[in-house]
Amino acid sequence: MDMARSRLLPARTRGPAIPIASTAELAGAARRTLVLRIALAVALLVLALAASETGRSNAAAARGLLPSGGTGVLVLDVSRSIKPAANRTIVNVLQQLIRSRTRLGLVAFSDIAYELVPPGTPSRELRSLLRFFAPVRTPRSGPDPFPPNPWSSSFSGGTQISLGLTLAHDALVRAGNPRGSILLVSDLDTAPDDVPRVAQTFNTFRAQGVKFRIVALSARADNLSLFQNLAGRDAFVPHVSSVGSGVGETQGALQGRTPWSLIFIAALVLVALAANEHWNGRLPVPRTQS
């Protein structure tokens, strides 16, 4: 074969090839492939933004509970006046704090107050409390599906909210954060002689710059009105979403509720994008030698 003829022959290519004269016929297919690539890439971006927004919304929900981003203390009412229906709100508060991955302390109170967790503890440590407030329905659970909690025998039916608030602030002072935030979760049914002390405590918090918020647990109208006057309406968390009461949901909260649905959809989109690139990739076009 002479040199002149060899220059007219196309160079060898690896894999399938098409003549240059026919490439215009594939313009439509090329556009469809490009559109498909863009659509799959946008889907991945939307899923990534959704996962990010989920994390931000969880953190925002916790910031709605804790008045500031610093160290806080959860002050939890465990008196006998707390009705079983209020346990759903308690579980939801604990879940939001756990998901926020913040640091806080925990004070439980009834007629006495006890520091269960010191300030600065990772919020994931609250997971162990969920089982005491979520009902467990089994054939043997009977009319009361809630398991006994460790405070049933030690705390009486009386309530001294001021003791819980004062102990929470003392814990913040010992932790070196006297202006940390305090979240009171209670039915607001305190003893009559404790009302002046509660009022004084709130006044002290305001004077010292201590931020506080309140989650009312099925509070009676008179107690709610009283505490709105003592603490101010702005101190109350406007709404805490209720959660289911099933065992499976409780276990999901204990595990942090990983968004497996988002992860599964993202994996499917990623596989589709990879398959599109594998089977619909650009074909190599042979080049002729001049």
Image (cartoon, rainbow, N blue to C red):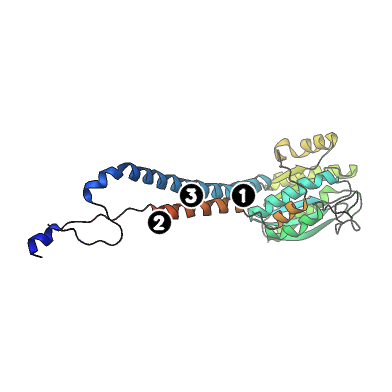
Which callout, 2 or 1, points at the residue further toward the start of the chain? 1
Q: Position of residue 8 (x, y in %)?
A: 13, 57
Q: Residue at x 47, y 52 (%)?
A: 272
Q: CA distance from mark 1 to mark 3?
A: 23 Å
Identify the residue under disc 2.
Answer: 278
Q: Amino acid at mark 2?
A: His
Q: Earlier in the sequence, mark 3 or mark 2?
A: 3
Residue 202 versus residue 119 in the image, above or below: above
Quadrant in which the N terminus appears = bottom left
Q: In the rendered image, which residue does mark 1 sit on?
A: 59
In the displayed structure image, the side of residue 144 where residue 58 appears, left or right: left
The residue tagged with tag 1: helix, strand or loop?
helix
Quick check: can you spot residue 259? no
Give amino acid for label 1: Ala
The residue tagged with tag 3: helix, strand or loop? helix
Q: Which residue lies most toward the bottom here?
A: 1
Q: Which residue is mark 3?
A: 44
User: Viewed as shown, does residue 15 lie left or right of 78?
Assistant: left
